[in-house]
Every structure is written in structure tokens, then in C-alpha cells.
Amino acid sequence: MTISDTPFPATDNLTIGFAHHAYQLKERFAARDTGVDHFQVYTPEKLNDRMADMDVLVVSGLWDDALLENAPKLRWIQSVGTGYDQFPLDQLRERGIHLSRAFGVMREAVAEQALACMLSLARHLHFLRDEQRKHNWRPYISDIPNREDELAGKTIGIVGIGLIGSRVAELAKAFNMRVIATKGNPSTYDGPADKVTGAEGLHDLLRESDYVVLTCPLTDETAGMINTHTLGLMKQSAFLVNVARGGCVVDDDLVSVLKSGGIAGAALDHFHEEPLGANSPYWDLDNVIVTPHNASETQMYEENLMDILIENMGRLTRGETNLLHQIV
């Protein structure tokens, strides 16, 4: 018998624990006036101390598998993010604990960040910011290949054109770009991309693209897929933008290619280890834009997450077991 064999608590007997070191989850939930008891913790230690009190946990980066040993009442985990590779899916199934993710809450934000990175790379904004700090008015450039560029007419290759990738495609089309993409099942795609293939089309995508944008999940198939071989297929003038997961990229290979001029540059928002270590070579590469995994962080994030949380809470209290964006 698992905890899921007993009815989900009614709202007047339900406790939700929010766990995040920065986001104002408790305040935004309170504003919805649900009457449900709730609290927020901000550190791993406090989370561990309060696990026994909660029926529902809203968490992402503070998660640790050992927390399950202190969670006799836990019925449902709502991830703060889209990714869920940090959670022990088999253990959750064994214990009858639901898991849902915040799919879609960051669609606009991450897609806009991808386009912002492309524009920054094309217009050399990261270089110009460096010149600003030096109070240096950069002169006009005679050498045409070294000038800023335009997105119009260029080809963007989107690796993993799901919800976020589809929005990137829509935005890229507004800039008059050619859009090609890969998708696990291309027959399910219905959007503005000019060409969508399965994973077998990755190598052609890399060869053709001026901007390669990763929006894929981290899976056995995508782990380490950006490596010396695949980077070698890209144009020397091409840029890599990663708003997916750091595990999709082999860091040593990418650093080597960036240093040698194998590709023109990269914008990276996710890394194998976060925060990015002070000794990481990425910090010192002029042709790299590093952002601190903030692509999804906007003023609307908490509100978008609350929409999913309250919808799923309603389903569970009504005895339903099919959740919005359910993983387990």
C-alpha cells in the first residue's frame, strides 16, 4: 500500500511547502486566496526540517533524494522548473508520489532570451559593452567579415523544436530568418519552420545553420551531443546558443573549438555545474556570452507557476489523478 491509496487531503487539511532561495512563491500563492495552509523555506537545511509537515512540495534546485526519508505525508511534487532529471522517478512511483513540472511557464521568457542572445552575438553587443567600460568609442570597421551582422536572411537551426523551440521559430520568422529544426517525431510539428526532421537530420542542420539553438531536453540521446565531431560540422561563422541543459554540451570540446575559431561564438545559459566555477574558461572567452541560468526568470514567473499549481491542486482534491504536465 502506498500513500496514493488514501484520498488526497481536502483544501482545509492540506499543507503546501514552497522551497526556493529567491522566488517569492509564498507571497504569490497567498495572493490567490485559496485558504490552503502554506509556508516557504529558503535553504536545504530548513527544507529537510519541514519535510514531515507538507503534503505538497513545490521545489527545484533545493531538491535532494534523501528528503524522501523525512516525508511521510508527501503526495505531490510540483517542480518549479521544466527540467525533472534531478528527481528519482522510480522512487516516486514506488511511494505513489505525483510529480508534475512547470512546462510552458517559461516559453516566452526562454524564447526571447534565445533571440536576445542571437541579436547580441550578431550586433557584437557584448564587445561594445566592453568598449563602453573602457570609455572607448570604437571606429567604423573596414573589414566586412568583422562587422556586425543582420539576422534577416540567415538560417537558424533549432535542436528539439518543442514548446520553447516553436516560439523561437515564430520569433525568428519575424526577423525574416530561414528556420530548420529537429524533433523526436517531426510528423507532430505544426508551425512556421521551413523544414523539420527527426534526430537523423542533426548533422545537416549543423552544416546549414548560421545560428544553432538548443531547446531540447537532456536525455540519453542528447547528452554530450555537442562535441568535437558535431561542432566540426558547423560553419566557422556560426554561433551556438544553449538555452537547454548544460549536459547537452561537452565543455572541453566547446572551449577548444571556441579558442581555435572553429565557430564564431556562443551564448550559454546552463552549465554542468552551477554556479559556474570561478576557474571556468568560459568566463575569459571574449566570444562567449555567459548568463546565470536566468533565461526563464522574468517578473511573470511566479504567476505562471501558480496557474499550474492551482489547476493541479484542484484536480487532486477532486479525486482526479491526471495532472497538467505530469511526469509521475
Image (cartoon, helix red, strand yellow):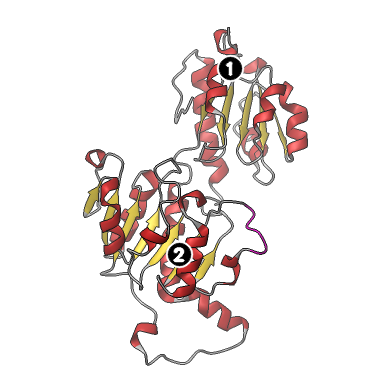
Query: Pointer 2: what residue?
Result: 117
Three-letter code, disc 1:
Arg
Among the 4 quarters of the image, the one containing residue 115: bottom left
Q: Which residue, as the protein is rendered here, is positioned at the far front? A: 229
148 or 109, which lies in front?
A: 148
Residue that appears at 26% across and 56% down: 180
Q: Amino acid at mark 2?
A: Cys
**Mark 1 lies on residue:** 95
Residues shaded magenta: 274-279
Q: Secondary structure at mark 2?
A: helix
User: Is 278 in the magenta?
Assistant: yes
Q: Secondary structure at mark 1?
A: helix
Image height check: is 58 above or below 192? above
Q: Residue sitting at 50 percent across and 37 percent down?
A: 102
* Residue 138 image position (x, y, % from top left): 50, 89
Say few, some or many: other residues with alpha carbon within 10 Å of mark 2 (under 14 / 14 to 19 / 20 or more).
many
Q: Looking at the picture, how far across and down is residue 169, in whole percent?
A: 32, 54
Task: Give left or right: position of 250 versus 27.
Answer: left
In magenta segment, residue 165:
no
